[in-house]
Image (cartoon, rainbow, N blue to C red):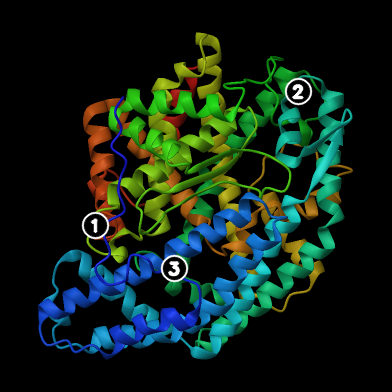
Amino acid sequence: MTLEIPVKPPRTFIPEDFNVESWEITEPYFMDLLERKLRSKKDLIRWFKDSSELESVLSEDLAWRYIEMTRDTANKEAVKQYQFFITEIQPKAAPYTDKLNHKALESPFINGLDQSGYKIMIRNIQTELKIFREKNIPLQTEIQTEAQKYGQISGAMTVEVEGKELTLQQAGVLLQSTNRTLRQEVYHKISNRRLEDKKVLNELYTRLIGLRDKVACNADFSNFRDYMFDAMGRFDYTPQDCFDFHKSIASEVVPLLDDMAMNRKKMLGITELKPWDSAVDPTGKDALKPFRSGGELLKKSVSVFSRLKPWLGERLSIMKVMGHLDLESRKGKAPGGYNYPLAETGVPFIFMNATSTLRDTVTLMHEGGHAVHSFLTKDLELGAFKNVPSEVAELASMAMELLSMDHWEVFFKSEEDLKRAKREHLEQIIATLPWVATIDKFQHWVYENPGHSQSERKKSWNRIFDEFSDHITNWNGLQEIKDYLWQKQLHLFEVPFYYIEYGMAQLGAIAVWKNYRENPQKGLSDYLNALNLGYTRTIPEIYETAGIKFDFSRAYISELMVFVKSELEKLY
């Protein structure tokens, strides 16, 4: 296969040899944009392109600093380089960004930019102006500095199992063991290790809540939730829509959780279903091992993507050649996984903590979906057109998980294992929707009540957790572990309110998959056409292009769950 490696487009405003070494050498480009005369529509468009180029250069510089820091949280130099950007560059750039936003909207030619992409961008600029307060700049810097501590704390967590030091991700694989005694031992080791840092994480979260609430108050919002709805550009739905989503999940999905848990308990032949019984195969088979190394995971993933569409596999191959992948779990590596778009290069970076599980396989399908999205939008005219809202970004990734399933025979040679893998993934989707509702509803409560005590936080968490959990799993004797389960969710610490999107996009992904099952060629084409739009249309319009609805109603969720259940039944 001959790969055409993308070349970073030539800069037309910022010198090719420019690097973000200090604010002093960066500021003149902001000054140029601020002082430039805009005498025509053509001047304004050129100005937007130059602004976009500066934003892309700065964005990619920050991206690499973040990537290197998360690849090795113990690397003090990497941490220092990241902190330099968020303390020395971002705070000084923010006032200029606000002034440039004013300049753009004050131009007499702004109304002449009637293309849909510009309309969306202008709407976003208006919102940025609405929420910007200069006194929030140091607070936002402090928030970023505090939030990064979560990765450092979590990345240092290890446990010893059978004489081996393992990351929590590596140890988590053992929860799929058919040896119940081992599962219980590992579950307690992982949980107890997390509990060692419960106090420091509780205090960190309290500090973050306080800082975020100040930001909201400074911007004249009644709470941080309302501030974030504007900051995240949630123009197409409201908090009430989120509450409707919660209710729909509780009524239409949680009963499926109960059915799954009851069936699991029966198949395992146990009198009490405990949390350490949730990952093991209920028929008593050893955990699926779809790959043995990061290299094998990537090779097989390229094959899966290629079978779906050759162009898709080539995207992962390009990332491999460019060194834009870090897949395997290791000590000191930050938890989780991400696809980080590189605004200037156009070829993103995938980071994850793979061990050998089906979940890891799905993670690369997921992040690969994000990566494909980055490739599809990289040639759009402005950076603002590429910065898609999370509800669209997660549609790209979650739909890819399901679309790729028709080709998972690459990972699973036996029909029995293939069916089992698909079955486990669909059951995981059913389990994920209530967890999304749990985290989102918890966040609404947290920021509606920013002055809450830690005991009130614990009580609220348990109330919400119970609302969206199955009623079969027995938590007796595990109350403290249950009290702090929220601390494993990095989004609460690092990207507040970025979670409901997973639920909304999961529903969209199921609908995309449903279309694909009915007409593979059209279903895939509609999906890719929607991603091609970037953020040049509203969220409902992008979903409509994909041939699906942006809908959280009980009736729609019920319809999609009926489809998932029918697909599951085919796999038994």
Say which of marks 2 and 3 sits in front.
3
For marks 3 and 1 on the same chain, the one whose residue lies earlier in the sequence: 3
Residue at (21% x, 69% y) in the render: 118
- In front here: 454 or 560? 454
* Kind of residue at disc 2: Ser
* Image position, residue 95 (x, y; %): 44, 87
* Kind of residue at disc 3: Asn
Which mark, residue 19? Answer: 3
Q: CA distance from mark 1 to mark 2?
A: 47 Å
Q: Quadrant of the N terminus?
A: top left
Check disc 2 and report its element: helix, strand or loop.
Answer: loop
Residue at (72% x, 51% y) in the render: 155
Q: Quadrant of residue 510?
A: top left
Which mark, residue 411? Answer: none
- Count residues near mark 3 (Cα–Cα under 10 Å), then give few for <14, some for 14-19, many for 20+: few
* Image position, residue 13 (x, y; %): 27, 72
Q: Are marks 3 and 1 in contact (CB under 8 Å)?
A: no
Residue topped by disc 2: 177
